[in-house]
Image (tube, grey):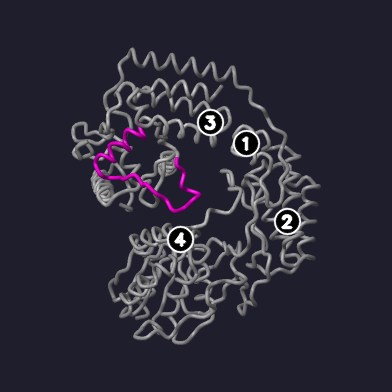
């Protein structure tokens, strides 16, 4: 029924348009229909189609009528033409919309499916049927106790079967099941808040079992969008080359490299880009601050990336190969820096690293090691606390979890990691003040 | 179609060029990318989307990609599009033009903030 209505609407498009792009238009609507399930989303799709039909029909099938037009020199941010539709056309469109809305609402009987069991590492039934993105069904299960019990049981089973220490995994799982039995999760809808509460319980139980603070145990993740059912498609060499080209075009995520007054080098790096594409750019960036009397590395907007590039930059800050702790078992990143680097003059210069609550993952790896090695003064906010060191497992359409499945390397430092707790700065200031504070510190130490 | 019809760049055309900045995409992917990059405010319908695509093709701002090496992405039913150097330049100029207007708006204290 729904597809018939869509097909009918598409047949109302101008004949020239259908000849040129009819097949693509049908495909586009099919794609949307496949991903936008649920009454509200389907109605929205029909309304979008009706509006687009009106706009296209009123303007005729004209190639590229300027949609952002100047009106007295001021641009409009509309996507529809600046000329308003005729009143009779508006009336016809409104009547059509009302008719379709009524027809669709009366004929569509939404089925609330029984809650799909959460299979470990597999798509649930709802995923296979494509109903995982069904908003109404999602709402229906949001407070369903059975769905919640099933979810907790799946998380507990993962912990039992996959956590690196099976005995601890069993106790973590038992603790979660006990919380569920006690009704501690009853007040939570199935969503992000429930995931956060489960994570808190995992952390608390882990601490009670002797796992040090900052060490990754497991992390339950909720995604409003349906999680993919399989691994991402393999990258081709062409795709890789395009990614590399895009990175180089973005200066390998170096947003700013400059020398501030008093000969303080400043670099703002918004991610650690892939070393194979950016090794030379990173080298040039470091060379451009080589003569600075102090260096500020701004990682406030750095969400992580590739540890190799973080290790490459750290290499300029030491005069000998220096161990950098990586919490990931079997990490591809070498354990030591490539120091000393020929011609480098930064090894004895003061370094300030700026952080925010958004600094995470590989950026935290960089900050953590420089702080533990007492090689940098960290200025700003406590970092995000995302080690991302576990393997990810899909639980159902909207939940997955990372689990520490292999033993991490021995950590020589007193603070054993940054998972959840983040990295505390040496000078704690709001992110917006961090640069000013670091500049003053750098100038005072010259 | 003559290029001057795309000067200034229409909003939909600008959004499409931005969506293609990273990857080659087909129509539905472009629609989804535009929806994401506008925070859900803009969902291009087939008429708007393909009229803009045709204009961009005519202007040489995008090109159809005729072959794909990735089997997962190589779907004969779909046409993929790629932004050209001219399209990238047009998008950059439009972005700079909008940035200039934002600066004026800030100078007039209509908008506040330092990030532009």
- Where does the magenta region start and end? B48-76
**Gap in angstroms between the C-alphas marked 4 and 2:** 38 Å
Identify which residue, A424 or A50, lies in the foreground.
A50
The 10 Å Cα crowd at callout 1, few under 14, some 14 to 19, many 20 or more, is: many
Q: Is residue B60 magenta?
A: yes
Q: Residue drawn 50% across and 32% down? A: A30
Q: Which residue is mark 3?
A: A41
Picture coordinates of residue B45 (x, y %)?
Answer: 40, 31
Same-chain check, marks 3 and 4:
yes
**Gap in angstroms between the C-alphas marked 3 and 4:** 41 Å
Q: Which mark lies nearer to you, 4 or 2?
A: 2
| Chain letter, disc 4 residue | A
Q: Which residue is mark 2?
A: A158
Identify which residue, A259 or B32, lies in the foreground.
B32
Q: Earlier in the sequence, mark 4 or mark 2?
A: 2
| Label 1: element kind | helix
Query: Considering only vertical position in the picture, is A66 above or below A15?
Result: below
| Chain letter, disc 2 residue | A
Q: Earlier in the sequence, mark 1 or mark 4?
A: 1
Q: Is residue A214 left or right of residue A118?
A: left
**Gap in angstroms between the C-alphas marked 3 and 1:** 13 Å
């Amino acid at each position: 029924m729904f597809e018939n209505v869509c097909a009918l609407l598409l047949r109302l498009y101008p004949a020239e348009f259908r000849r040129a792009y009819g097949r693509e238009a049908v495909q586009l609507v099919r794609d949307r229909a496949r991903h936008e399930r649920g009454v509200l989303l389907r109605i929205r799709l029909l309304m979008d189609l009706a509006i687009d039909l009106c706009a296209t029909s009123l303007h005729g099938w004209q190639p590229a009528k300027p949609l952002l037009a100047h009106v007295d020199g001021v641009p409009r941010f509309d996507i529809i033409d600046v000329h308003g539709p005729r009143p009779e056309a508006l009336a016809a469109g409104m009547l059509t919309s009302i008719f379709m809305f009524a027809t669709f609402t009366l004929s569509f009987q939404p089925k609330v499916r029984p809650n799909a069991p959460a299979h470990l590492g597999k798509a649930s039934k709802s995923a296979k049927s494509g109903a995982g993105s069904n908003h109404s069904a999602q709402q229906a299960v949001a407070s369903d106790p059975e769905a919640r019990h099933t979810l907790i049981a799946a998380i507990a089973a993962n912990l039992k079967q996959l956590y690196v220490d099976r005995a601890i995994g069993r106790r973590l799982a038992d603790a979660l099941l006990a919380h569920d039995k006690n009704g501690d999760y009853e007040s939570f809808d199935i969503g992000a808040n429930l995931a956060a509460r489960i994570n808190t319980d995992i952390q608390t139980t882990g601490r009670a079992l002797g796992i040090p603070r900052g060490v990754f145990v497991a992390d339950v993740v909720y995604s409003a969008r349906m999680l993919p059912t399989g691994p991402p498609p393999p990258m081709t060499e062409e795709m890789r080359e395009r990614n590399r080209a895009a990175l180089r075009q973005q200066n390998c995520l170096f947003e700013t490299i400059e020398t501030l007054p008093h000969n303080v080098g400043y670099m703002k790096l918004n991610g650690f880009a892939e070393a194979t594409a950016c090794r030379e750019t990173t080298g040039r960036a470091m060379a451009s601050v080589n003569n600075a009397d102090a260096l500020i590395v701004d990682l406030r907007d750095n969400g992580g990336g590739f540890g190799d590039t973080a290790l490459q930059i750290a290499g300029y800050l030491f005069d000998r190969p220096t161990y950098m702790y990586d919490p990931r078992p079997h990490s591809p990143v070498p354990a030591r820096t490539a120091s000393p680097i020929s011609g480098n003059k930064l090894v004895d210069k003061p370094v300030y690293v700026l952080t925010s609550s958004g600094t995470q993952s590989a950026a935290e790896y960089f900050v953590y090691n420089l702080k533990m090695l007492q090689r940098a003064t960290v200025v700003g906010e406590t970092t995000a606390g995302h080690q991302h060191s576990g393997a990810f497992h899909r639980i159902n359409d909207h939940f997955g979890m990372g689990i520490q499945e292999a033993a991490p390397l021995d950590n020589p430092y007193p603070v054993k990691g940054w998972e959840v707790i983040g990295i505390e700065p040496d000078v704690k200031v709001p992110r917006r003040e961090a640069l000013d504070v670091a500049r003053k510190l750098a100038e005072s130490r010259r | 179609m003559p290029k001057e019809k795309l000067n200034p760049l229409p909003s939909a055309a600008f959004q499409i060029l931005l969506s293609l900045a990273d990857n080659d995409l087909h129509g539905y992917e472009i629609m989804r990318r535009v929806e994401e990059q506008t925070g859900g405010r803009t969902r291009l319908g087939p008429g708007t989307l393909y009229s803009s695509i045709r204009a961009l093709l005519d202007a040489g701002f995008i090109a159809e990609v005729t072959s794909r090496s990735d089997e997962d992405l190589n779907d004969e039913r779909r046409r993929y599009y790629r932004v050209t150097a001219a399209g990238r330049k047009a998008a950059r100029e439009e972005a700079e033009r909008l940035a200039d207007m934002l600066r004026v708006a800030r100078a007039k204290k209509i908008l506040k903030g330092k990030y532009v």
